Amino acid sequence: MKKSGTKKVVLAYSGGLDTSAIIPWLKENYGGCEVYAFVANVGQDPKELKDVEKKAKASGAVACKVVDLREEFVKDYVYPVLKTGALYEGTYYLGTSMARPIIAKAQVEYALEVGADTLCHGATGKGNDQVRFETTYTALAPQLKVIAPWREWDLRSREALIDYLKVRKIPTTATVEKIYSRDENAWHISTEGGVLESTWNQANTDCWAWTVSPEDAPNQPELVTIGIEKGEVVSVNGKKLSPYNCVATLNKIGAKHGVGRVDIIENRLVGIKSRGCYETPGGTIMMTALRGLEQLILDRDSFKWREQLGIEMAYVVYDGRWFAPYRRSIQAAAEVLAQDMTGEVVVKLYKGNATAVQKKSPNSLYNEEFATFGEDEVYDHSHAGGFIRLFSLSSRIRALNEEQQKQTAKKAKK
């Protein structure tokens, strides 16, 4: 039965099996509506974008728009999150999570441009992406309707999707042998499914797409110099680069040393645990450099506050609340801390490890004269006694009170 009321739909389109099937399905189930395909280039493999417009129209789309979002993605989404030090559940660099809001925002802009009344995405009903897309839609264009085919149709397997397209004579290069589900952008690539569905299976070589195995990485370490200005990476080995090119350059360097691999089981927002292998070589190097630099610059309370900001930001981004005031408030606090985050860090790459081995900053609070274990003339050790007495004053008063109570209790027994 066809559903009415939808005239123009803008679909977040990738050219893959799912979204290729969604285009004819929308036309068949929503009163012959016009479908506009929207493709976001966020740094995925160029092969995925080859002939994507032709492919969309062959599936039944009236038009297809491809937008290059790579620089905006890194500069306005990745870099702000990096300043907070956000890692979801301590390990995940939020590659997919950060990409969804910029894709959904650009999709909304295209929908308003063509006068569409509906938005559509290909996210499944089990995952986080449906939340991320639709939360962004709601924040930016609540007047537009949303269609999520995976919550409606009865196509439940790759075989069913391939047969669906074959019956309609719509070309596809997809095969039933596809084992893994992958998501790729400028920041990372993720791999799920296949052998990873059993937590007792070790990830095999097929589970990793970008990085070499640390065991097969070069036997000689490599030093890479990261230039940082106000919490943003601006140069690699002395060469000034745009944010996107900083990431792309460091991805290549880190990948050959096996840097940036994590194999994790995470808690999805919808309540399901999932396992994935994530590769973020450039991001791991950047995070190592930034966290190394802040050791020089941030005082104790500022460092603690930055850590708290990172924890909160990780959940905000993972949950798809990018356009919420809460995210902006966290970011505002992180920007204040980042103002002094300028300097250089040398990161050593070796067999899957990234270690900050040299650090310098004009804003460093580290003072060798104060920190030395040798003889100095700037620190009077005797001053520490008064500090400790004041610092432990509440503990002293508590102990004295307890002793007084004991003495009172003894007298009462006599």
Image (cartoon, rainbow, N blue to C red):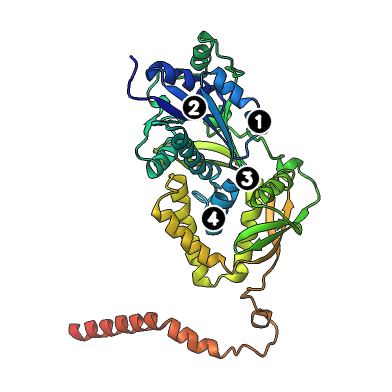
The residue carrying pointer 1 sits among few (fewer than 14), some (14 to 19) or many (20 or more) residues within 10 Å by Cα, namely few
Where residue 300 appears, as percent x and y from the top left, is 52, 71
Judged from this view, the residue extending furthest toward the top is 167
Q: Which callout, 3 or 4, points to the residue nearer the camera? A: 4
Around disc 2, counting alpha carbons within 10 Å, would you say few (fewer than 14), some (14 to 19), or many (20 or more)?
A: many
Residues at marks 3 and 4, CA–CA distance in whole angstroms: 17 Å
| Residue 150, picture quadrant | top left
Residue found 55% across the figure and 58% down from its top: 83
Sequence-first tag of 2 and 1: 2
Lower sequence index among marks 3 and 1: 1
Residue type at mark 3: give it: Thr
- Mark positioned earlier in the residue sequence (3 or 4): 4
For the image, the number of numbered tags is 4
Q: Nearer the viewer, mark 2 or mark 1?
A: 2
The answer to whether residue 361 is above or below residue 30 is below
The nearer-to-camera label among 3 and 2 is 2
Residue on which the image places disc 2: 36
| Secondary structure under the numbered disc 3 in the rendered image | loop
Kindly identify which residue carries mark 1: 206
Residue at image mark 4: 80
Q: Residue at x 67, y 29 (%)?
A: 47
Which residue corresponds to mark 3?
280
